Image (spheres, grey):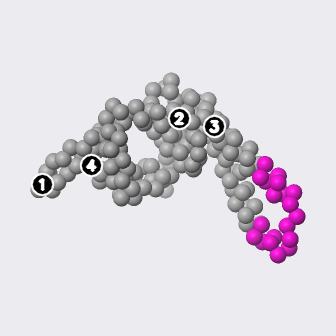
Amino acid sequence: MSPATLYALNKLFEQGISLFYSASLGSIRSALTVLLDRAHVTVAESVDNGRSKKTYAITDAGRAAFIEWMLAPIASGNLETIALSKLYLLGLLPADARASILEDITARTARDLAQLEQLAVMLDSMEVPPEYREIFRYQRLTLEYGLMSHRGGREFFAQVSAGEAQPTPPTAPR
C-alpha cells in the first residue's frame, strides 16, 4: 500500500472495508497511534497549501505483523468480521499463503456451526412454559439466522478455497 494521510485511509475504509467493519476517523487515528508506537508505520509531516499534513507509511515490521495476523488462526472475536477482513485483504498475499488462511476460516466456521447446531438440539428439547413462548420464539429465530449464516459462510469459504467461487459481475442499470 502506498503512503497515505489519515483522511485518505478513512476514505479507503468508507469505500470498501466499512461494508463489514465499522471504523470512525477517531478509531483509525487511535489505530495509527498504536501502529506508530509499535514501529509498524512511520509518519512524515509536511505542509501542503499552508496546512500541516501527516502521511503514514507501512514499515517492514508492519508488513511482517500484517502477514502474521493474516496467517494466524481465528481464535476469538467476531468470526464474520475477521473472516471478511482476511478475505478482503487476501490478494495482498502470495498465492501459496492464501490456501491455509481459507482453510482456517472454513474450519472455524464449521466449528462454530457445530456449536450452534448443538445449542439448537438442546433448545429444541426444552419444555418452554407458555408465558415464555414468544420470547423463546424470537430467540430461537435468532439462532436460526446464525445457523443459516454459518452454513452459508462454510459453503462459501469452501468454494473460495477450492477455486470455485467467482465474483458476480455487476448488472447493467435499468
Residue 113 in view in this figure: yes
Q: Which of 159 and 57 is in front in this view?
A: 57
Q: Which of marks 2 and 3 is nearer the N terminus?
A: 2
3D distance between C-alphas at marks 3 and 4: 35 Å
* Residue lying furthest front: 37
Magenta stretch bounds: 118-136
* Residue lying furthest top: 96
3D distance between C-alphas at marks 2 and 3: 14 Å
Position of residue 11 in the picture relative to residue 118 (left or right): left
Within 10 Å of the Cα at label 3, are there few (<14), some (14-19), or many (20+) other Cα atoms? Answer: many
Residue 96 at what x, y percent from top left? 50, 24
Q: Which of marks 4 and 2 is nearer the N terminus?
A: 4
Residue type beneath disc 4? Thr
Q: Which residue occupies 84% across, 57% down?
A: 124
Q: Name the residue under label 3.
A: 106
Within 10 Å of the Cα at label 4, are there few (<14), some (14-19), or many (20+) other Cα atoms? Answer: some
Residue 101, relative to residue 22: is it above or below?
above
Q: Does the magenta stretch include residue 128?
A: yes
Secondary structure category for the residue under label 4: strand
Q: Which of marks 2 and 1 is nearer the N terminus?
A: 1
